[in-house]
Amino acid sequence: MKGYVDKDLCVGCGMCTGACPEGFRMGDDGLAEGWQELPDSSIDDARQAAEDCPVGAITVK
């Protein structure tokens, strides 16, 4: 599984990087990005980040 960020929606708040640093990071453009396959231990954190994203920019699949 991997986290994906819709850059057209992302506002760069960084919430997802705090909630799941194993799956999300801030890119050079100041927006979040999914950057690697999620370890099994981080899938729930990534799903929670998707649920909590204030603009609904995150999907996990």
Image (cartoon, rainbow, N blue to C red):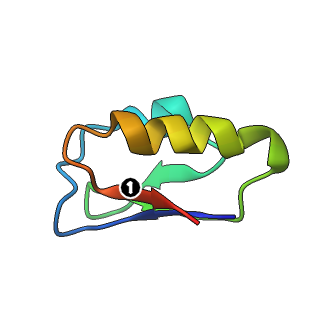
Q: Secondary structure at mark 1?
A: strand
User: Which image quadrant is residue 42 in?
Assistant: top right
- How packed is label 1: few (under 14 Cα within 10 Å), some, or many (20 or more)? many
From this view, report whether residue 30 is shown above or below residue 18.
below
- Residue at the (61%, 35%) spot, across then down: 45
Residue at numbered disc 1: 58
Q: Amino acid at mark 1?
A: Ile
**Extreme-right residue of the structure:** 40
Residue 55: percent from the left, percent from the top? Answer: 19, 46
| Near-viewer residue (28 or 34) | 34
User: Which image quadrant is residue 59 in?
Assistant: bottom left
- Residue at the (26%, 50%) spot, across then down: 56
Left or right relative to 42: residue 48: left
| Near-viewer residue (35 or 48) | 48
Q: Quadrant of the N terminus?
A: bottom right
| Near-viewer residue (25 or 47) | 47
Residue 16: percent from the left, percent from the top? Answer: 43, 39
- Residue at the (26%, 64%) spot, across then down: 29
